[in-house]
Amino acid sequence: KPYLSPLPNGSFDAVVKHAGDLMLASDCCAWSLSASRNVLSMTTDSVSRKLGLLDGNVWGVRAQASFVNMVEDHGAGVVWDVAWSVELWARGYRFFRYRSLATRTVYRLPGGLQTSQSAEERRDLENAQIQKLSQKHAGLIHFKEKPNASLSTMLYSFSAVGPEPLIMQRPEALTAGRRYVGFALRAMTPAERQRRRRGGQKALEAPDTGRKHKVSK
């Protein structure tokens, strides 16, 4: 059964560097992790380039002056990530999302930041703003009733527009101790140092072929 597991120490730096390089190479202006924490909706090796939700918890952008006040309706704060994603795409800006990585948050749980409104009140505000967006950008987003959805699920769907996803290559082995090239700029962990020592010991050991050699006098 698939499940989410924490990133190894130091690997998030490699994600940020990869995202920065990919933005420059692909002429994109923004990136984010997956907005979905459902492993059945995620992938292990793809970067989506289609219109979708930029996750405001972890994202990056090549800031431009035209981004100021792009989300004009102040009431859109309850659906800001949705509005930001749609407004970017509508103006011709493109972005990508790492479908294999997601963040775990607690601010929308009881005791978090979203305690000034009840779930029902927030849902009503979300619906009103999503309907405004769907009227303004009918070709990109649609208000979508979901009878079985929980109150934490927004009622919308994006249009299926955008290029095919990028498929990531498997990590490249670096040494017997440090496994991936992306970790080369950070200090080795105790486990990596142990692997390097073991690798060095194995290289020094002569293989035992099991054969007996006759020694002449």
Image (cartoon, rainbow, N blue to C red):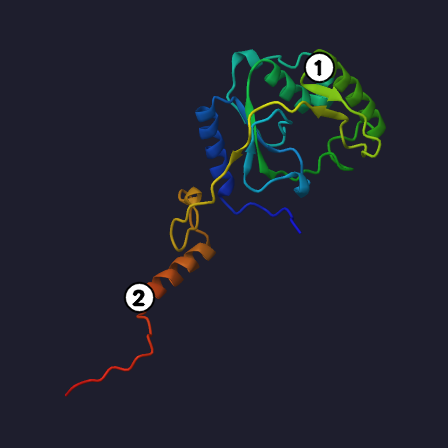
Secondary structure of the residue carrying numbered label 2: helix
Q: Amino acid at mark 2?
A: Leu
Drawn side of residue 49 relative to residue 134, left or right: left
Residue at 55% over, 29% down: 164
> Residue 96, percent across and down?
55, 28
Q: Are marks 1 and 2 in contact (CB under 8 Å)?
A: no
| Residue sticking out furthest to the bottom | 217
Left or right: 186 as drawn, with respect to 78: left
Sequence-wise, the earlier of marks 1 and 2 is 1
Give the residue at x 38% y 61%.
199
Residue 127, given in percent of the width and then of the height, sits at: 79, 21
Identified at 76% across, 30% down, the residue is 114
Residue 24 sits in quarter? top left
Residue 97 occupies which quadrant of the picture? top right
Q: Which residue is mark 1?
A: 138
The amino acid marked with disc number 1 is: Ala
Foreground of the two, 163 or 10: 163
Marker disc for residue 86: none
The answer to whether residue 137 is left or right of residue 48 is right
CA gap, disc 1 to disc 2? 67 Å
Which residue position holds label 2? 204
In the rendered image of this protein, does residue 216 appear above or below residue 30?
below
Q: Is residue 143 left or right of residue 190?
A: right
Q: Position of residue 183 (x, y in %)?
A: 44, 44
| Residue at figure coordinates x 75%, y 19% from the top left | 130
Name the quadrant of the C terminus.
bottom left
Q: Residues within 10 Å of mark 1 (few under 14, many from 20)?
A: some
